[in-house]
Image (spheres, rainbow, N blue to C red):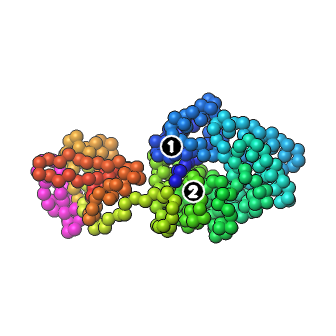
Amino acid sequence: MLRSIATVSISGTLPEKLHAIAAAGYQGVEIFENDLLYYTGTPAEIRQLAADLGLKITLFQPFRDFEGASRAQFAANIARARRKFALMHELGCDTLLLCSNVQPDCSADSELQVADLRALATLAEEEGITIGYEALAWGTHVNRWQQAWERVRRVDSPALGLVLDSFHILARGDTLDALPSVPVEKITFVQLADAPYMKMDLLEWSRHFRCFPGQGELPLEPFAEQVTRCGYRGPWSLEVFNDGFRASPNGATAKDGYRSLLWLEEQTRRRLPTCDADLFSPPPLPVYHGLEFIEFAASAAEAQRLGQHLQALGFQHEGSHRSKQVTLWRNGGARIVINHQPHSWADHFYQRHGVSLCAMALRVDRSAPIVARARALGYATWQGDAGPNETPIPAICAPDGSLIYL
């Protein structure tokens, strides 16, 4: 499975985005035109940078407002397409995303729309370019995927296929139930995004509130299942417009997105256990037996005050570590550790956050599968120092920098 993400999904300059995307583990990237326009170098330089980072440029986007335009505008659109194709050759990309027309004065005549699309597909075929046609949820006349497919079918060109975007399809309440009627070779590309349910204008909802799979409420799991069941084995690519993501550090955002693709692949594998698709299949989770303890980081003075507060809450001092400045407090089945050991993980956490929850411990029957799963998902693991006759306890580094002991 080739995992990809659109550059519009994260913050930074285009080179910064490509470095973050490669570091997160993606194999592919969609280049959003605005990112290229703001880049001071050349498309050839971006092509080389992507290659150096091991990234395939899976898609160039978007090409807008083409089909059904006035005849004077149609000629300008063809000239615009030629310029786009030349740029794509320099970029080293052979797939272009064409959005359905959103102009209010574009023609509703489907014959004219098909003729325009056929002309564009003929030009694309001459140039060795594949075009993926996408029904924008707010398109003037084409705003559902089956409308887009009907036009692609009528054009009947090897250079024109269909782009399936989960947001545009699911935000309108549509499904992929009719997808088996579409030849799999006509599915050019699949874009994935989730979103919380919101009663608002579709364009505003799309441009500001998309999120990664599993973070919203759209039925991404059946969507991915149906796409996979029909035989599609091309890229799964994230295209997320989100104000918060574009204002956040791109490294963490890119990694979160990559994990969301892995999560969606895992759910798809569970739905299609015998499928031949190369889907993420981590070790199964062991049995969870509950919370063993939570751990606070503190200074020596603050550890004493924290212990007094715990006593007021009914906790009793259960014991102290024999070689470290760590104490255990207990109230029934609840256990709290206070760690003020100098130069420890807890001390580093305290230096950054003050008195705070720095770790928790989960009781499981086997830790190895969880550690393997965490590493597969891109999380760091931690193994603290163990003294004589002490048992080392494996831990996973959570996104906030705290530890999860097993």
Q: Name the residue under label 2.
A: 233
Q: In this view, does 154 lie above or below 242?
A: below
Q: Residues within 10 Å of mark 1 (few under 14, many from 20)?
A: many
Label 1 – label 2 distance at C-alpha: 21 Å
Callout 1–callout 2 Cβ contact below 8 Å: no
Q: Quadrant of residue 370?
A: bottom left
Amino acid identity at mark 1:
Ile
Residue 185 percent location from the top left of the image: 66, 57
What segment is highlighted magenta in the picture? 307-335
Question: Residue at the spot x=67%, y=62% of the render?
Answer: 183
Foreground of the two, 290 or 298: 290
Residue 177 percent location from the top left of the image: 64, 70
Return the disc, 1 or 2, that comes first in the chain's sequence: 1
For the question of whether residue 209 can be seen, the reply is no
- Residue most extreme to the top: 41
- The image quadrant where one finds the C terminus is bottom left
Foreground of the two, 221 or 94: 94
Q: Is residue 176 above or below residue 1?
A: below
For the residue labelled by badge 1, is the local secondary structure a helix, a strand or a loop? helix
Q: How many numbered callouts?
A: 2
The question of residue 14 being in magenta is answered with no
Residue 103 percent location from the top left of the image: 79, 52
Q: Mark 1 points at which residue?
A: 21
Numbered badge on residue 284: none
Q: Residues within 10 Å of mark 2 (few under 14, many from 20)?
A: some
Amino acid identity at mark 2:
Arg
